[in-house]
């Protein structure tokens, strides 16, 4: 980082290129294009496949609004899909029933970093003629049958937001093996300027550039890329710590009948971006909200991922969704709690979460 600051090249430049190359090597994909957020990565991915007004894009109701808002940028329709009951990822069967002649693309989200059933997703996308864009905001470094997320679909979008498993403060990456898609993303992330126009201020660069499209200002900076390179080198180590915490939580909470621990499918490696437990109906006298409050009083911060999109005013007002439309996602939402999990978490802090939840389970047993 200090080298980057001293070198004086602060915005997109040599460090960004280095970060992209290192990321592509790590993932095992041909191209990695750095951008300034996961949302920008999703937006550019949809732009690269040529999404048009009135097109439809299938995506889960159970996600962050970024997955869907990028569809609305094109005046296309986000068509919400319910979750399956094992990992609460997009339910492919439900998606199949929502295909129309206008459906163009599919955005599966690897919720909490547990990969979707990518075999089922790929078969469905092929049979319906859809392009798959994976929302991998939670899925670094997740794997499916030995292959990293980021290599399985035409386009994958990662996020380096402050809470993510690799962070540059804000940032994102598009990965693809397709040269045409990669050059389109590269063009559109920086004003639609001719390739390598960012070099125009360097000794070897030319001042001349052409504007080929009305592009966006979505580039990552070299300051952020310097952070990203350091984080990438630590990515496996940070994953091992998160996986060890998840293992410890699994052992402890499987002894409590009040909670359901996350299920892991065979042949996948979750990223363990989040560790989400579900309350078991009928076991406790208190609702999830009160459990969160009880944990807060014990000094333990938690979160809820996510309030399903169809319960938000925007998705109801503009797209006509209603409460009750996605029963699995809604039931999940009522029961889910994201517990603390981060690489710097000490064993003592992990034990405190385990003891506190055990205490709550005993105190409020039905
Ligand atoms: C599932 C999902 N998709 C996309 C995003 C957007 O990423 P960013 O905040 O980097 O734009 C997020 C961010 O939290 C997310 O959780």
Image (cartoon, rainbow, N blue to C red):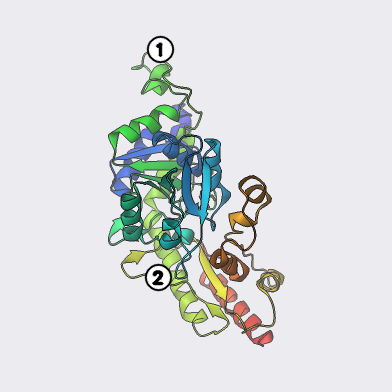
Q: Is residue 133 visible?
A: yes
Q: Is residue 41 above or below residue 135?
A: above
Quick check: 271 left or right of 315?
A: left
- Tell me the distance, in whole angstroms, between the alpha carbons under discs 2 and 1: 53 Å
Q: Secondary structure at mark 1?
A: loop
Seen in the picture, residue 193 relative to 249 is either above or below; the reply is: above
- Cβ at disc 1 under 8 Å from ligand 1: no
| Cβ atoms at labels 2 and 1 below 8 Å apart | no
Q: Is residue 152 visible?
A: no
Taking the image as shown, residue 200 lies to the left or right of residue 40, namely: left
Q: Nearer the viewer, mark 2 or mark 1?
A: 2
Quadrant containing the C terminus in the rendered view: bottom right
Residue 41 x %, y %: 46, 40
- Whether residue 120 is situated above or below residue 294 in the rendered picture: above
Q: Please indicate whether residue 212 sits to the left or right of residue 344 in the image.
A: left
Placement of 234 over or under 243, stated as above or below: above
Under tag 2, what secondary structure? loop
Ligand 1 is within 8 Å of the C-beta of the residue at disc 2: no
Tell me residue 236's x, y (percent). 37, 57
Q: Residue at x 56, y 77 (%)?
A: 354
Q: Position of residue 166 (x, y in %)?
A: 45, 50
Q: Say which quarter of the image contains residue 333.
A: bottom right
Q: Which residue is mark 2?
A: 264
Earlier residue among tags 2 and 1: 1
Q: Name the mark on residue 207.
A: 1
The image shows residue 96 at horizontal and vertical percentages of: 41, 57
For mark 1, does the 10 Å Cα neighbourhood hold few (<14), some (14 to 19), or many (20 or more) residues? few
**Crowdedness near tag 2: few (<14), some (14–19) or many (≥20) residues, C-alpha within 10 Å:** few
Identify the disc placed on residue 265. Answer: none
Q: Residue furthest front?
A: 101
């Amino acid at each position: 980082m200090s080298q980057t600051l001293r070198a004086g090249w602060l915005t997109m430049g040599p460090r960004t290129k280095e970060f992209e190359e290192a990321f592509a090597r790590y993932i095992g994909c041909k191209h990695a294009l750095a951008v300034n957020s996961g949302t920008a990565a999703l937006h550019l991915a949809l732009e690269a496949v040529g999404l048009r007004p009135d097109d439809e894009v299938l995506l889960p109701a159970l996600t962050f609004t970024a997955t869907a808002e990028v569809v609305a940028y094109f005046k296309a329709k986000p068509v919400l899909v319910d979750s399956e009951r094992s990992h609460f990822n997009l339910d492919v069967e439900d998606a199949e029933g929502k295909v129309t002649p206008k459906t163009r693309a599919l955005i599966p989200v690897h919720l909490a970093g547990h990969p979707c059933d990518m075999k089922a997703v790929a078969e469905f996308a092929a049979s319906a003629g859809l392009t798959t864009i994976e929302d991998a905001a939670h899925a670094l470094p997740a794997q499916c049958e030995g292959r990293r997320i980021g290599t399985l679909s035409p386009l994958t979008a990662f996020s380096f937001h402050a809470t993510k498993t690799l962070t540059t403060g804000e940032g994102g990456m598009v990965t693809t093996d397709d040269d045409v898609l990669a050059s389109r993303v590269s063009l559109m992330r920086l004003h639609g300027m001719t390739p390598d126009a960012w070099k125009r201020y360097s000794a070897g660069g030319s001042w001349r550039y052409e504007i080929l499209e009305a592009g966006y200002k979505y580039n990552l900076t070299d300051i952020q890329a310097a952070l990203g390179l350091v984080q990438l080198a630590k990515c496996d180590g940070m994953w091992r710590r998160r996986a060890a915490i998840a293992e410890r939580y699994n052992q402890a909470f499987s002894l409590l009948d009040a909670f359901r621990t996350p299920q892991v499918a065979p042949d996948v490696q979750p990223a363990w971006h989040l560790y989400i437990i579900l309350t078991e109906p009928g076991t406790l006298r208190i609702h999830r909200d009160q459990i969160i409050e009880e944990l807060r009083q014990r000094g333990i911060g938690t979160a809820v991922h996510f309030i399903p999109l169809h319960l938000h005013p925007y998705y109801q007002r503009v797209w006509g969704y209603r409460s009750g439309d996605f029963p699995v996602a809604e039931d999940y939402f009522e029961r889910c709690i994201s517990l603390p999990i981060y690489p710097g978490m000490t064993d003592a802090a992990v034990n405190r979460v385990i003891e506190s939840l055990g205490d709550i389970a005993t105190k409020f047993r039905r």
